[in-house]
Image: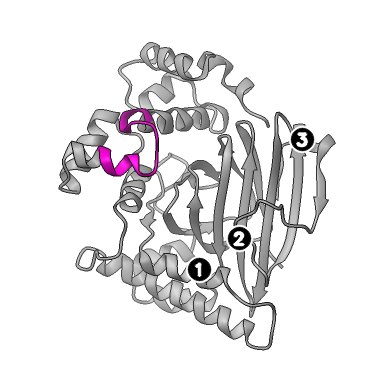
Amino acid sequence: MIPLEFIPPKSAYYSIQKSTAIPADQEFAIQLAKVQLLEWKFSGVNYILQQAYNTEGSFVVFLTVQISDYTIIKVKCNRAITVFQYTIKGNSFGYLKGHGCLPLFHDTYTLQYIPEGAHQVLFAPGTFHYLYLDPGPAITSLSSVDEGIKKVLLGLNDFQEAGSLAERLPFDQKVLFLISKLKSLAPDNVYSPFTIRTIINEFVLHYYEQLHYEKSNPEGTKLIAELNAFIANNIELPVPELITRIKKLFFISGKHLRTQWKKIDLKNLRDSFNQLRMHFALYLLVIEKLTISEVAHRLNYADQYNFSKLFSRFYKVSPKMAKTLVKI
């Protein structure tokens, strides 16, 4: 049984339709998986597509979320689990009960303890692809040689409700290769459980290698993935400081950084970062229910008036009206 249930907003209940079909335009169609589709309408078509399979006590879930409005999706976890969470496409912010903010930035991933209970994710309009992977007993063997992994398995993350963001790792060529192997699995046959278990074990081993050998072996990691991981872990920094740290850490000029960024985003670098910070601000106001002053302080704005001015310019409503922007 897959212990994660993804629930549309209450305001969509009147229009929810359920099926086991895969939308015609879906770029991720996993032949081996059990399919669950929830569709509803606001200003456009919205859906949650879950493609999942179990194997030997573990599970793999490819999740696609298509959203037409700012929307909060509830994630109900029926039992505490430790999973790998890979964000394949899109940027969003989740709130993990007992943990705090979980930034879900594309081309990044993390090993994450998810406690039993209800959690929330704030989505901006767009299409999002995720992979959730239960490592099963393979990850337990690493806890004896890695204190950080042991803490995650015990739910003893250093990131608690106070709000530190969970550290994420960038996709490299090995991660992309393993994801493609899962996507290309043939229809169910006698070898499938063994093949999936082998792939899961490869994910686990690579996670350990990337944690411990990434600095000495950076080949194969895309610059954009590394940037996304850094931004996810440092989104609270003011944009000028964020850019300055990126240039220093990655030994990259401002011109080259802007050129690389243009390959994935039509907006300029500063506009992209400001948009992500505004999305984070909306998350803090609506999900964590911080005050305007607390959000301004969290995001290192000079004062709440400066923050309110920028927020109002971006969303066309004041921070006091933030909740009206979101389908809940």
- Specify whether residue 264 is painted magenta: yes
Mark 1 burial class by Cα count in 10 Å: few <14, some 14-19, many 20+: few
Tell me the amino acid under the disc marked 3: Ala
Task: Please give the residue where the numbered disc 2 appears in the rendered image.
Answer: 62
Q: Decide: few, some or many residues near mark 3? Use Cα within 10 Å; few <14, some 14-19, many ≥20.
A: some
The CA distance from mark 1 to mark 3 is 33 Å
Rendered residue at 42%/12% (across/down): 309
Q: Position of residue 135 (x, y in %)?
A: 52, 72
Q: Circle 3 — which element?
A: helix
Q: Do the CB atoms of the residues marked 1 and 2 lie less than 8 Å apart? A: no
Query: Which residue does the image show at 42% across and 63% down from the upper left?
Result: 151
Type of amino acid under label 1: Ser
The residue indicated by pointer 1 is 180
- Quote the CA–CA distance across marks 1 and 2: 12 Å
Task: Give the spatial CA distance, label 3 vs label 2.
Answer: 23 Å
Residue sticking out furthest to the bottom: 190
> Would you place residue 232 above or below residue 296 in this image?
below
Q: State yes or no: discs 1 and 3 in contact (Cβ < 8 Å).
A: no
Q: Which residue is mark 3?
A: 12
Is residue 4 among the parts visible in the rendering? no
